[in-house]
Amino acid sequence: MELEGQWWKGQLAGDIYQALRYKELKLPSYKCQSPQLNLRRYFADLIAIVSNRFRLCPAARHLAVYLLDLFMDRYDITVQQLHMVALSCLLLACKFEEREDRVPKLETLNSLGCMSSMNLVLTKQGLLHMELLLLETFQWNLYLPTAAHFIEYYLSIAVYEGDLHDGWPIGCLEKTVLYMAKYADYFLEVSLQDHAFLCFAPSLVAAGCAAASRIILRLSPTWPQRLLRLTAYTWESLVPCVEKLLIAHDSDMKEATKQKCPQAGQQPGQTVYHNSGQTAPMAQYLHLSSVQYPQQALQPVLAPSHGSATYLNHSASLQGPNAPPHSHPQTISATLDSKANIPNRAYQVNMHYTCAAPCFDR
């Protein structure tokens, strides 16, 4: 239904939002104590690949990863079982967030190329047992808000005609709204890649995604009063989350630029930028909510590696282990890392952020 698909535009939007904010206060605690924590990124990518293959809604994908995080935090699980757990989390999240006809079928799941590469065949009985275990673990409560549940409500007022772009009125409001939605989706994907974002409330992560998107789009003020009133988050409370998002974006842009624009004579490890933007200290963006950005001439660059579309492009590199189940965490890590080849992101503050780095062609 249209009302279900765009709840943030209905008359009950405020009540639904307040119910979500109240529910997030009672979310289960996450202690970051899983013995397989180093495999978490791999299985989050697996969920993203499968969810994009079936074009599932972001809420289902984020809920699936959150269920996986909570389950791994409570159990010591073998690699082969983790594959079953990850896909069961996705199916369970789909049954909660999607329409019945949108839930992937068992036969379709087993026909996926990534399933054969992992030498994994799902059975109806195995999935039912795993789903029952998951439901018992969460006490049959899947009403667990994630950042994806909040972002559309925030995006509804994230861009207004009164906003400024590079200190000038916005030229095309519709295009700016479209870019805002794309960047917000990108930053939501970034937040899925690192369990460090679980230390923030889901509504704060969503607000941080909106703020980071406004920074990338060079909209001012960075955190207007309307967003402050709607989210109840001050700019100071958003800074730690926004900083992590911007550092991830900066790393992606450097990697994308190196791959797209290699130059003769470039030194190993040296990044060459093809825009006229000046490198500015990240601190000026994170501590000034009304910053005015200088005008800059931009050139389009490649989309960052966290974009949702790139999961399908890189699905061939997500090769699962063919080894039998193990119980030793170190053996599991060595077996999976040698084939998955998915690096863990290390967020290191370099205190410099490249402002002129749009990820979508204009």
Image (cartoon, helix red, strand yellow):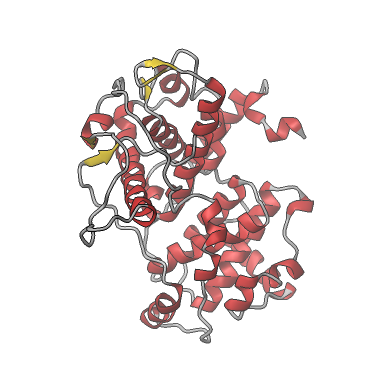
Of 88 and 173, the residue lying toward us = 173
Q: In the rendered image, which quarter is residue 235 located in?
A: top left
Tell me what residue is drawn at x 36 percent, y 24 percent: 222
Tell me what residue is drawn at x 22 percent, y 41 percent: 352
Q: Give the side of residue 200 with respect to residue 311, left or right.
A: left
Q: Residue furthest front?
A: 264
> Which percent across, then down, holds residue 262?
32, 56
Of 43 and 76, the residue lying toward us = 43
250 over 2 or under it: above or below: below
Q: Give the side of residue 37 with respect to residue 10, left or right.
A: left
> Which percent across, then down, holds residue 281?
20, 35
> Which percent across, then down, holds residue 274?
32, 42
> Which percent across, then down, holds residue 210?
44, 32
308 over 229 or under it: above or below: below
Residue 250 at least partly seen: yes
Q: Give the side of residue 39 with respect to residue 141, left or right.
A: left
Counting the numbered discs, the total is 0
Tell me what residue is drawn at x 47 percent, y 84 percent: 326
